[in-house]
Amino acid sequence: MSARPYKIEAQPLVQRYARGWHCLGLASDYLDGQPHTLNVFGRRLAAFADSAGRIRIVDGFCPHMGADLSTGRVEGDRLVCPFHGWQWDGDGQCQSIPYCKRIPPKAKIGTWHTCVQNRLLFVWHDPEGGAPTDDVAIPSIAACESDEWSAWVVDKMVIGTNCRELVDNISDMAHFGTVHAAPVDYFANLFEDHKATQLLVGRSERLGGDELIALSTYFGPAYHITEMTGQSGGHPIHSILLNCHVPIDMNRFELRYGVMVKKIEGLSEEQNLEIARAYVAQAQAAFYEDVAIWDSKTRIDNPLLCEGDGPLYQMRDWYGQFYLDAADVRPSSRQRKVFEITVREGGAVPALHHVFER
């Protein structure tokens, strides 16, 4: 008697967004003196830089008559409503109403914690309203301040699916060979506290030649950094990859994919730039192969796994902590766990650790 077909299960999505820092791209993009519209976490926000260059993020709709503040203008330290001219500062306080001397006591809008690190802008989200703590601070990348490295090259796109599909990749060993033509020799995951790390040793004709080494870490639910060693044009290439997302709603997220490349000694700036651009194009092309899969796949809560798959259920247990109230997070979801898969014996394997930790 044949077995019954496996039944795919997918529970209805709960309207909740992850607790953690979310990257909004290059900080310099927000220093143009204009307000910026942010459609994130199922709502409208407005970002603007004050006169000191600090980037402030506030709720996007004016409580007076509901106008979109992100379509207004910036005057000094204030965001001016395009409808009636009410002026709001970065702390959410109404500072002026052009036709009224008395500001209503309730004239305050919501504000959001931000930080700038590694030349990137981050916004903090917590469904309970808590502030970020020091233990989840975004780690600095020394290469961002070094003349030995190129600047970030960042691309942005909207992906029409829930962001869990993206995060699943941290434990999905098997897709590298099928989707990216990059067979894996060794694969490992390390889960610990708010960090999840993947170490991959494999081969990629596009990116690494006979040896591709990629160490990548999620710092929280949405900010992912990879240190990768490969080859391009016969030259060894050291690169840092940015893979970050912020949910627009439960079925769409905004993804930013970036690359910076270490300059090759002895080559001119023009030559280094040419190599960097070529490597960036190849790295991005490889990533967009995943996007094509997401466009047509279905959500599955009970994936049918086999022996050669990575620790997907353990990864989802780690990831789930960001969607629970802090008091409800199980200690086991944050405990240190290591999983290793050796596909092909031979060759040295780097030590497993989180990115930027030794």
Image: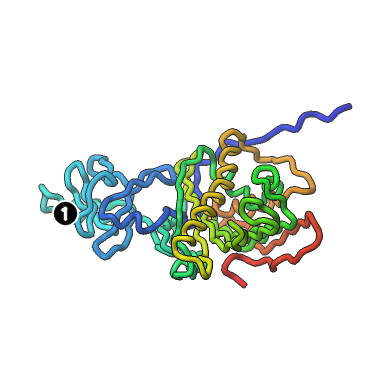
160 or 66: nearer the viewer: 160
Residue farthest toward the right in the current orientation of the protein? 1
Q: What residue lies at 70% left-to-right and 67% top-to-bottom? A: 350
Residue farthest toward the top in the current orientation of the protein? 1
Name the residue that disc number 1 marks.
96
- Secondary-structure class at tag 1: strand
Quarter holding the N terminus is top right
Pointer 1 local density, CA inside 10 Å: few below 14, some 14–19, many at least 20: some
Q: In this picture, is 231 found above or below 134?
A: above
- Residue 318, percent from left and from top: 63, 55
The three-letter amino acid code for the residue at tag 1 is: Ser
Q: What residue lies at 54% left-to-right and 54% top-to-bottom? A: 279
Q: Is residue 86 left or right of residue 135?
A: left
Q: What residue lies at 17% left-to-right and 43% top-to-bottom? A: 84
State whether residue 288 appears in this view.
yes
Residue farthest toward the bottom in the current orientation of the protein? 358
Q: What residue lies at 57% left-to-right and 59% top-to-bottom? A: 226
Q: In this picture, is 170 found above or below 358?
A: above
Q: In this view, does 274 lie to the left or right of 73?
A: right
- Residue 206, percent from left and from top: 62, 51
Q: In this view, does 149 lie to the left or right of 348?
A: left
- Residue 348, percent from left and from top: 75, 66
Q: Is residue 111 left or right of residue 248?
A: left
Q: Quadrant of residue 270?
A: bottom left
282 or 152: nearer the viewer: 282
Q: In this picture, is 136 found above or below 112?
A: below
- Residue 213, percent from left and from top: 65, 60
Tally of numbered discs? 1
Quarter holding the C terminus is bottom right
State whether residue 332 appears in this view.
no
